[in-house]
Amino acid sequence: MPRRNDAPPNHKLLAYLCYGEDDSYWLELRLSLLSALRFLRPDDGISILIATDHPERVATLGVDVTLEHLTPAMLKEWRGPHDYGHRIKNSVVPWLIDRHNAPVCLVDTDTYFYQSPRVLFDRVGPRRTVMHKHEDLASTRRIQRALECKMLTGPDKTTWTVSSAAMRMWNSGVLGVDPADRHSLDAVLWMSDEVYERTQIFNVEQFAFGRVFESTTQLSRADDVCAHYWGMARPFVHERMRRFLATFGDRPVAEQAAATASFSIKPPRHPLPRRILVASWRRWLKLDAPMAAAALAAAAGDPRRPRDPEFQRIWRDLSLRWIQESGAADIARCSSHFTAVRDDEALALMDAPEREQWRAFWHNADA
């Protein structure tokens, strides 16, 4: 299809990238869309665009959107020479700008709007870009160690130095850019390839966006406009969204959008006494953060206590994941903090697949 240069004045695109077979992305997408529609007005000049390899699913959203069909060949090409999945985001942003010649805010599916997307686009313009927020991650330090003070020269002969002073990592849950800065996206794609080849670190994609945008534009954060709830919050949001749709899914879209005002994207909070107890235990044994999180999650998932059974199951799943991540199953095997996922009385209250999963885990821990 040809490049679209006939975009109307003040036209803007709130874009989503949703591909693959995981149904949870479509749950997230629907929540994000509804939370945005709660604020959007017809005279905002903002269109919603969904780029997907499953165009047949867009109609199920019940929302008027612009559809961009991504073929398997396109997705394969966008993964690049190193078969790097997150590189698809580096590729789709310039592709959308080339096709629509309009400011684009690409928003991850796992987002929730606190304010109108209008506020995002107020921060986007020539030499003005937006990302979600900057964050301190261990992966940033890994990139720094791999590339400290190395000079990288781009295809346009621009020289980039990766150093401690230029290593702030920005989260790419929101990406806003104007067509006037289309050239910077070529640098982003090149840098993503260059750094991924050297480091193989999973979030090089967002490092490249942040490094280029911060150097060539005025880069603003967007976490006051929308939340990006990646991580442990996601399974709780997914369960809440299923319940939301069971209640509101048959209602008009405007009513669904209004109802998202009371939607919570935060995980349930652990009681303060339990947090204090686990913090003391962690300091005493000098444990890492995943192990402390696993202990809190195990207590929250105790099937012997009459709470929300679906949330309890989520907590237990998280506990198992964090014990494995910590590599301290021997400590969990003996600690009273894990009786809710270890003792026979508790295991008997779980369904058979989960019970066998835990029994197999403890058996392997003993081996």
Image: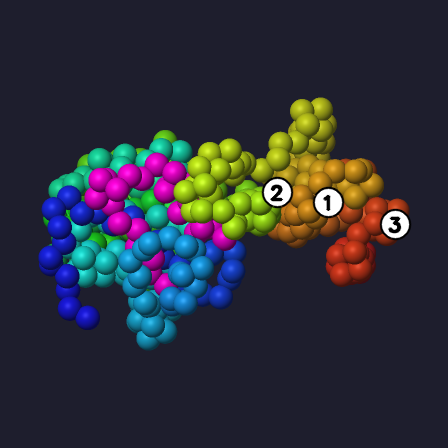
Q: Nearer the viewer, residue 306 or 207?
A: 306
Q: Amino acid at mark 2?
A: Pro
Viewed as shown, does residue 106 lie left or right of 95? right
Residue identifier under label 2:
290
Q: Nearer the viewer, mark 3 or mark 1?
A: 1
Outermost residue to the bottom: 73
Region rendered in magenta: 27-52
Name the quadrant of the C terminus.
bottom right
Identify whether 188 is placed above or below 173.
below
Pointer 3 or 1: first along the chain = 1
The percent position of residue 186, horizontal first and vertical second, equals 19, 57
Classed neighbour count for the residue bearing mark 1: other residues with Cα under 10 Å, few (<14), some (14–19), many (≥20): some
| Residue 170 picture location, percent across and down | 34, 42
The answer for how far apart the CA atoms under marks 2 and 1 are is 23 Å
Q: Is residue 235 magenta?
A: no
Can see residue 255?
yes
Give the quarter of the image for residue 353.
bottom right
Mark 3, mark 2: which one is toward the viewer? 3
Q: Residue at x 40, y 61 (%)?
A: 59
Residue 276 higher or lower than 210, as above or below: above
**Is residue 29 highlighted in magenta?**
yes
Kind of residue at disc 1? Pro
Proximity of marks 2 and 1: CB atoms separated by less than 8 Å: no
Mark 3–mark 2 Cα distance, whole angstroms, equals: 24 Å
Q: Element type at marker 2?
A: helix
Q: Earlier in the sequence, mark 2 or mark 1?
A: 2
Q: Which residue is mark 3?
A: 344
Q: Which is more toward the observer, 308 or 59?
A: 59
Secondary structure, mark 3, is helix
The residue wearing badge 1 is: 309
The image position of residue 134, as x and y in percent, is 36, 37
Image point (19%, 61%), residue name = 99
